[in-house]
């Protein structure tokens, strides 16, 4: 299974999951929610997810390190400030929240399987190998950070 590690960009994984969620929503029961409520909840979750993504990228740019998730071995610094004080993977949290917003908009409970699929895929094929690379590059500093900050939230 190592062949899939760092091969598919996370935005592409999220897009595939969003399409899967749309397909599921076409063939599964939906919740009857008033449009204003549905839109409000979806928008709130979407904005929160976008904020996580932007804050993660901004922190990386401030530290002058790579934001390329396919090449974690090129990291030049371990970012522990900003949103990285609360999550080791805020950009992935952001993508998961964007998918959750999509599920809220679709109002199809079974569409939540797409969020789960994203989290499981990213955990196995993106985060685990990234953490191995960061442990190799930053050693004890990364281990201390890992002990202090959760992987997701």
Image (cartoon, rainbow, N blue to C red):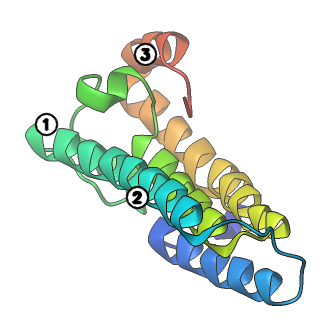
According to the picture, the residue beneath numbered tag 2 turns out to be 69
C-alpha gap between disc 2 and disc 1: 16 Å
Would residue 78 be seen by someone viewing this image from the given angle?
A: no
Sequence-first disc among 2 and 1: 1
Task: Tell me the CA gap for discs 1 and 3.
Answer: 16 Å
**Helix, strand, or loop for circle 3?**
helix
Which residue is drawn at the image coordinates 49% and 50% (left, top)? Answer: 92
**Residue 55 in the image: x percent, y percent?**
25, 43
Please provide percent x and percent y for residue 79. Answer: 27, 30
What residue sits 63% from the left and 63% below the top? 104
Q: In the image, residue 145 lies at what x, y percent?
A: 43, 16
Quarter of the image where one finds residue 14 = bottom right
The quarter in which the N terminus is drawn is bottom right
Q: Which residue is painted at 45% across and 31% down in the image?
A: 88
Report which quarter residue 59 is drawn in: top left
Residue 145's label in the rendered image is: 3
Residue 63 badge: 1
Residue 133's place in the image compared with 141, above or below, is below
């Amino acid at each position: 299974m190592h062949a899939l590690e760092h091969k598919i960009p996370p935005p592409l994984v999220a897009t595939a999951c969003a399409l899967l969620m749309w397909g599921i929503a076409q063939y599964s029961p939906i919740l009857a929610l008033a449009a204003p409520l549905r839109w409000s909840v979806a928008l709130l979750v979407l904005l929160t997810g976008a904020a996580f993504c932007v804050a993660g990228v901004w922190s990386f740019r401030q530290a002058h390190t790579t934001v390329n998730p396919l090449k974690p071995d090129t990291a030049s610094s371990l970012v522990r400030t900003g949103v990285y004080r609360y999550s080791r993977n805020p950009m992935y949290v952001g993508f998961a929240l964007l998918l959750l917003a999509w599920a809220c908009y679709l109002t199809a409970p079974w569409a939540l399987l797409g969020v789960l699929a994203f989290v499981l895929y990213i955990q196995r094929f993106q985060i685990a190998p990234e953490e191995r690379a960061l442990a190799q590059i930053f050693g004890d500093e990364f281990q201390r950070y890992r002990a202090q900050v959760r992987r997701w939230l």
